[in-house]
Amino acid sequence: MKGKPERDHIAERKLWSISSETAAVPLSLVLFLLWTAATYLLEGRIGLLRQPTLIGRWIYVVVANILIGTVAAAWVLRSLLNSRLVTLDQLGFRPLGRTLFAVVMAAVVGFGIFLLQKPVSLESVVLLNAFAQVLQTSIAEVLVCWVVVGTSVEALIRGNSRVISLLVPILATDLLFGIYHFSHSAPFNQLHVAFFLMIPGLATSLIYFLGRDVYATILFHNYLGMTGVMRSVELSFLQHPLYLIYILTFISVTGLVGIHIFLLVKGNSRDKTKRTS
């Protein structure tokens, strides 16, 4: 009876595993391309940001950012973990105490930078609506560009000097973040804007690869994106409660926490099976 659980575990590991570091990067890029294509079809092609509708927003967020940017990202991350290419700590899923400290620091710094950008409004309902709307996208952006692609690139070049091992993933993720914006509505799909957005993208890269906390990185990144979104949509759209947007944001956050639990449980199960086999 002891052999059957071990065989089942081996079969599961084969199903979820990536064969090598060289296979991890192409798989992560496939995810990036699918996510970018879905963003273009459901948001950029129809100019959803400039003419927002709740139905359009729901379809875009659920398909592009939840199903692809979160659920599909979880499958790739599970494969990376099963192949021993990365650890949960490297991915940025850290113990609760450390995460809480990192989130508080990210909130203070991120909100400070947001205020320095002189936002068009500081009304509480406008801030809440902007924060909630941007967060739905920020979760997928960080998971796909930094957590999936960034750690895959990092695994590929492992063994190089500390500088190279840090610099290459930072530049790779920042470049992809800039390219991704061509799939969005105007003005984000304009060349000079996409290049400009690589500056906050670089800041997010530094926060992620130096701090190694997914939640803090998402929060920091979200504050960086709020000003641009607030200036790109009609302010009147943000001046009243958007309850359906809040529900969608709750689903997005729940999905993020869900993949954290999924990866944690699967990792513990794998380690337990390894010890008892």
Image: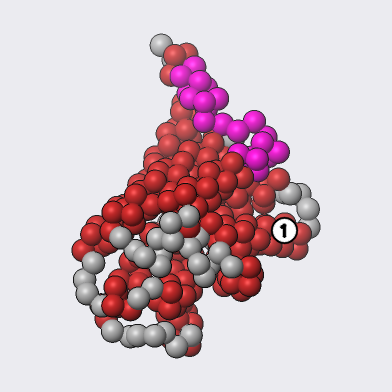
Q: Helix, strand or loop at disc 1?
A: helix
Q: Which of 187 and 99 is in front in this view?
A: 187
Res 247 seen here: yes
Q: Nearer the viewer, residue 267 or 147?
A: 147
Q: Where is residue 39 in the image (x, y as percent from the top left)?
A: 47, 52
Looking at the rendered structure, the number of numbered marks drawn on it comes to 1
Magenta highlight on residue 219: no
Q: Position of residue 61 (x, y in %)?
A: 37, 53
Q: Which amino acid does label 1 sit on?
A: Val
Res 206 seen here: no
- In the image, residue 81 sits, relative to residue 169, either above or below, namely above
Q: Mark 1 points at which residue?
A: 168
Q: Nearer the viewer, residue 267 or 166?
A: 166
Most frequent secondary structure within the magenta stretch: helix
Residue at the image point whose x is 60% and y is 50% from the top:
149
Q: Position of residue 66 (x, y in %)?
A: 39, 48
Region rendered in magenta: 6-27
